[in-house]
Image (tube, rainbow, N blue to C red):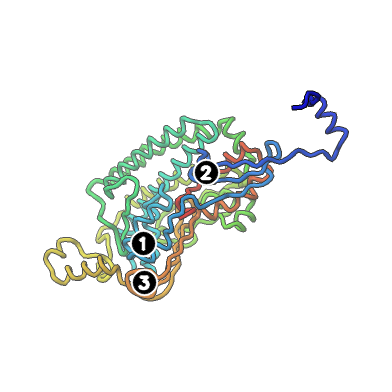
Amino acid sequence: MPTDYAFPDSAAKAAAATEAPEFQTEKMSLAMGPSHPSTHGVLRLSLELDGEIVTKCDPVLGYLHRGDEKIAENMTYNQFVPYTDRLDYLAPLANNAAYAIAVEKLANLTVPPRCQAIRVITSEMARISAHLLGLGAYGIDVGAWSVFLYSFTEREKLYKLFEDLTGARFTTSYSRIGGLARDVPEGWNANVDAFCDQFLPILEEILKLLTRNKIFMDRTIGVGVISKEDAIGYGLTGPNLRGSGVDFDLRKAKPYSGYEQYEFDIPVGSKGDCYDRYLCRGEEMRQSVRIIKQAIKNFPGGDWYAKDAVRIFAPRKEKVLTSMEELINNFMIVTEGPQMPAGEVYFEAENPKGALGFFIVSKGGGVPYRLKIRGPSFCNLSILPKVCQGNLVSDVVSILGSLDFVMGECDR
């Protein structure tokens, strides 16, 4: 290094900047993720910064890509059910039901009221479980550790109920085309009802930790504002859409599985900031409890699978062991898959993250010719380049947590 070189001090820098109004600082590139904890999975944000201000944000996806949609072309309709668990893996029961309803729509098949009620109960339980995890993780993102502990305690109770029903805690694979894997066990409804009764006061305690918390309010109010027009234009759905003031919920707008029978409210925000999106999810959990309790109170009897779906729903084991016709039917369904007519269909359900859609093209037989999945997290993340611009780097963490995405359904 030359001996006559001198590092300029801060006063000299300030004087130079004053003397040269055209002086501009250099922008810095920063890679946030794909292993950063606040990106909630393998999301990478390529940020351009002017000091602490984000001037450009490019989401980089694909680190979790598994080719689910291509895999579906080589599997029977029922064989693909476990793959739906891996979409929004925080709400597999809701994914299973949405996919099964889509295929049943293709087959022009209606399942019995008992099956519909079970799907509603499990989907709303999945919504509570997913929102609890999103809430706990969001608390950690902005510096509140206790919320995470409370929310995961309640999720553990839900996982016990999931295991009692499906035999699995995480990847349930519960729905089948034309019905369910099994009926609810004795006493399960009563246990779910008891969970709801004890959960509501605990939920209020959890929300009290954040709703009027000064630090949480400073980190979320007025941050990441998404206007109603932008929310619609970028294809946002779920709490992210309703947080921006759009009163749209598929359970009300296009009811399925008997949702038109239940009374519940749709929480809608007013400002479209991170705080509004948080409030919407908190209220959605209250409404989910309300739906579950109604479904249990009016729980229908009868079959939990469509008996008339001869070449679609596999016969019960006792019939397979005692009837040659049922044995042959079971063999054909297992080897060739549920027999579907040719055609195409699209169905979307109101999942915890938003509208989960399945577009299925069939040429007949037991394997789909083409299957396309509309992942709500993928569409919700599309607004990141706009909503992050002009915010601080620390605000990006708050914005990501408020969008509550899952990379499993984003990359697929």
The Cα atoms of the two marked residues, 3 and 1, are separated by: 12 Å
Residue at the disc numbered 3: 108
Q: Which of marks 2 and 3 is in front?
A: 2
Task: Assign a secondary structure to mark 2.
Answer: loop
The percent position of residue 203, horizontal first and vertical second, equals: 43, 37
Residue at the disc numbered 1: 100
Which quadrant would the N terminus be assigned to in this image? top right
- Sequence order check, earlier mark of 3 and 1: 1
Mark 1: give few (<14), some (14-19) or many (20+) Cα within 10 Å.
many
Q: Which of marks 2 and 1 is in front?
A: 2
Residue drawn at 55 percent across, 43 percent down: 400
The percent position of residue 206, horizontal first and vertical second, equals: 46, 34
Which quadrant would the C terminus be assigned to in this image? bottom left
The percent position of residue 5, horizontal first and vertical second, equals: 79, 26
Q: In which quarter of the image is residue 231?
A: bottom right
On the picture, is 380 further left or further right than 175?
Answer: right
